[in-house]
Image (cartoon, rainbow, N blue to C red):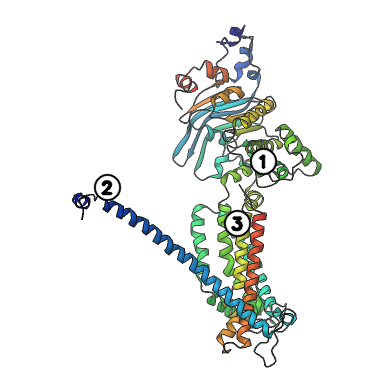
């Protein structure tokens, strides 16, 4: 019976990047059709190019991000996966010399995130981000979570409720409820990172960007963050950049493999790791380079 | 000369250490060790010399102050509202000098701290790299202007301008001395505060921007709190500079000890009084001569007090990131 579960579903397994409309038809073909494939697109990257100065970092990247699923971006260092992630909230705008070309359409209103006339602050209001290293502000735990809410004009009891909700969602409430006024820098690294996730969750973002969120953490803290991602699946659209292929396999519904600024292959995580179409992808997931 | 030395003379690279057990090698090793010790002694002497000089100054200040208080009661010193050591019937109340010092310092800080902080925010958060690289050294040039020039600027330019707006303003007044002193201090504040803000990691700013904050919110709510201890250090330096500043107040606020809280009047500060006595011919050992040490000791205690408070505040509010 285990063979039945492992048997590759040859017809359905390779989800075409552009094949938005294919999902319902494929569903009919396999009894094990992943529920994730029924989710509509939340964002579509279309022919995205990105430059810093004269250096082109992203080359004609196209990728679909499905709603309420976890999408992992993998690839060797310098492949552009973090750069791609940071396009989603226009983080590159903070530094001189950035240039975007192409589209990232954010559904449902299909606004092009990287268009020059799109306000980066508006996009950041809708898309949250957690960074590689925990970066709580040198303020109290409460104020850290409240920061984004205050920016959105939330005050009083609603503010308190939403801070509590965010800390509960980030599985941090029980550890911090008695010391909300303490400085956040007194928390452990793993707690700090969950605080940063709570800070992002508090604003109820449409997409949560995670940039190697566990690379600075120990294995136990990493496991807790991964559990958290698993709990958020189905409620929130998550894009995670990771160096750790085992992590991608554990947490991601979809995986996109990037190499030298190009998107090589994207699809269901299980297909990318077990049945990749591209030789390069197979070599990478087997650990032959990277 | 032994064989080893001869051999090394032949070697083009002077590989003389090859025989470390031989006499020549051992001598060189010993010599190197001695050189190290000698350097340590010389460097240490330089460090101790400066401590010694500082200690001597404090010692001299204290002994002369003790002599002063053998002639003047402590009560008189702290409670009298007159400071007239050079009069036939001298009074020794330090209050007028302390008040004048405090008032000019407050005026200076009310200029230097807001402007210096605003400039620091602009340079650190808003200015492009090129503008910062031009503007920051230019501002720092301001502190290369001799303070006596600032003093005459206050006396001969700022006071006449202010008198047009405020005709009752005295020729010597604490207002223009304080304002110009504030301008002099701006680069100290802006430069140090900018350094502190600049060293706040970009990651912290990115965290704020990622939540949708704009530049001002990021600067005020994240960068400044994170740089608070450095900014505080900049403010303390500004206070110390203002309390200890001599030429500007001596030139522009006059040398008349006067108990007044009105910035439109002139009054001698602690430093201005010391200058006045040093320029005059108070005989060595006289009570007038010793009074400058009492004033100097007061200045020393004020500055020390500020530094202690600042040290405490820095530890109390130290921000890590």
Q: Is residue A211 above or below residue A282?
A: below
Q: Nearer the viewer, residue B111 or B92?
A: B92
Q: Quadrant of the N terminus of chain A?
A: top right
| Label 3 – label 1 distance at C-alpha | 23 Å
Q: Is residue B46 visible?
A: yes
**Mark whose residue sits in front, 3 or 2:** 2
* Circle 1 residues within 10 Å: few <14, some 14–19, many ≥20: some
Please tell me how crowded label 3 is: few (under 14), some (14-19), or many (20+) other residues with Cα within 10 Å.
Answer: many
Q: Tell me the mark number nearer the camera, choosing from 3 and 1.
A: 1
Q: In the image, is residue B281 above or below residue B29?
A: below
The residue carrying mark 2 is B19
Q: Chain of mark 3?
A: B
Distance from the alpha carbon under mark 3 to that under mark 2? 54 Å
For residue A107, say whether it is visible: no
Place residue B91 in its image quadrant: bottom right
What is the number of the mark on residue A187? 1
Q: Is residue B48 above or below residue A19?
A: below
Q: Residues within 10 Å of mark 2 (few under 14, many from 20)?
A: some
Q: Are marks 3 and 2 in one subunit?
A: yes
Secondary element under disc 2, as helix, strand or loop, is: loop
Q: Which residue is mark 3?
A: B230
């Amino acid at each position: 019976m285990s063979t039945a579960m492992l048997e590759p579903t040859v017809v359905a397994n390779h989800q075409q990047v552009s094949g938005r409309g294919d999902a319902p038809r494929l569903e009919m073909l396999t009894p094990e059709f992943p529920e994730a494939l029924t989710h509509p697109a939340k964002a579509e990257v279309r022919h995205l190019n990105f430059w810093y100065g004269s250096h082109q970092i992203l080359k004609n990247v196209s990728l679909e991000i499905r709603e309420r699923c976890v999408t992992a971006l993998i690839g060797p260092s310098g492949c552009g996966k973090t750069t791609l992630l940071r396009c989603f909230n226009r983080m590159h705008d903070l530094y001189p010399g950035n240039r975007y070309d192409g589209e990232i359409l954010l559904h449902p209103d299909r606004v092009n995130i990287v268009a020059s006339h799109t306000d980066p602050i508006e996009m950041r209001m809708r898309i949250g981000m957690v960074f590689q290293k925990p970066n709580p502000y040198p303020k109290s735990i409460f104020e850290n979570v409240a920061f984004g809410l205050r920016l959105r004009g939330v005050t009083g009891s609603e503010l308190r409720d939403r801070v509590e909700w965010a800390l509960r969602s980030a599985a941090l409430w029980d550890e911090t409820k008695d010391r909300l006024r303490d400085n956040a820098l007194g928390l452990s690294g793993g707690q700090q990172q969950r605080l940063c996730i709570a800070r992002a969750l508090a604003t109820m973002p449409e997409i949560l960007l995670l940039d190697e969120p566990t690379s600075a953490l120990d294995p136990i803290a990493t496991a807790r963050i991964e559990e958290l991602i698993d709990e958020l699946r189905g409620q929130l659209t998550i894009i995670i950049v990771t160096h750790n292929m085992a992590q991608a396999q554990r947490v991601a519904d979809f995986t996109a493999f990037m190499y030298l600024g190009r998107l090589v292959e994207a699809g269901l995580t299980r297909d990318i790791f077990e049945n990749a179409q591209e030789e390069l992808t197979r070599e990478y997931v087997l650990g032959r380079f990277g | 000369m032994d064989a080893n030395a001869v051999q090394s003379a032949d070697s083009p690279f002077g590989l003389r250490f090859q025989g470390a057990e031989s006499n020549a090698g051992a001598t060189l090793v010993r010599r190197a060790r001695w050189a190290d010790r000698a350097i340590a002694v010389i460097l240490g002497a330089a460090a101790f010399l400066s401590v010694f000089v500082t200690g001597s100054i404090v010692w001299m200040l204290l002994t002369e102050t003790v002599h002063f208080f053998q002639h003047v009661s402590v009560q008189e010193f702290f409670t009298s509202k007159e400071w007239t050591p050079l009069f036939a019937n001298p009074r020794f109340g330090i209050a007028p000098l302390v008040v004048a010092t405090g008032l000019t310092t407050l005026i200076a800080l009310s200029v230097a701290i807001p402007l210096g902080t605003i400039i620091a925010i602009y340079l650190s958060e808003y200015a492009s790299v090129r503008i910062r690289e031009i503007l920051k050294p230019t501002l720092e040039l301001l502190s290369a202007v001799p303070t006596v020039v600032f003093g005459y600027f206050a006396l001969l330019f700022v006071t006449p301008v202010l008198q047009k707006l405020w005709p009752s303003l005295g020729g010597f007044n604490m207002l223009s001395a304080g304002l110009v002193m504030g301008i002099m201090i701006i680069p100290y504040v802006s430069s140090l505060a900018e350094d502190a803000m600049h060293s706040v990691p970009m990651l912290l700013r990115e965290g704020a921007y990622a939540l949708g904050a704009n530049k001002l919110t990021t600067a005020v709510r994240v960068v400044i709190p994170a740089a608070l201890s450095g900014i505080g250090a900049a403010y303390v330096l500004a206070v110390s500079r203002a309390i200890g500043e001599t030429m500007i107040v001596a030139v522009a606020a006059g040398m008349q000890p006067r108990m007044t809280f009105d910035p439109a009047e002139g009054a001698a500060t602690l430093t201005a009084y010391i200058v006045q006595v040093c320029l005059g011919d108070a005989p060595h050992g006289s009570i007038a001569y010793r009074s400058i040490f009492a004033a100097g000791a007061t200045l020393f205690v004020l500055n020390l007090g500020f530094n202690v408070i600042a040290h405490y505040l820095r530890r109390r509010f130290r921000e890590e990131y």
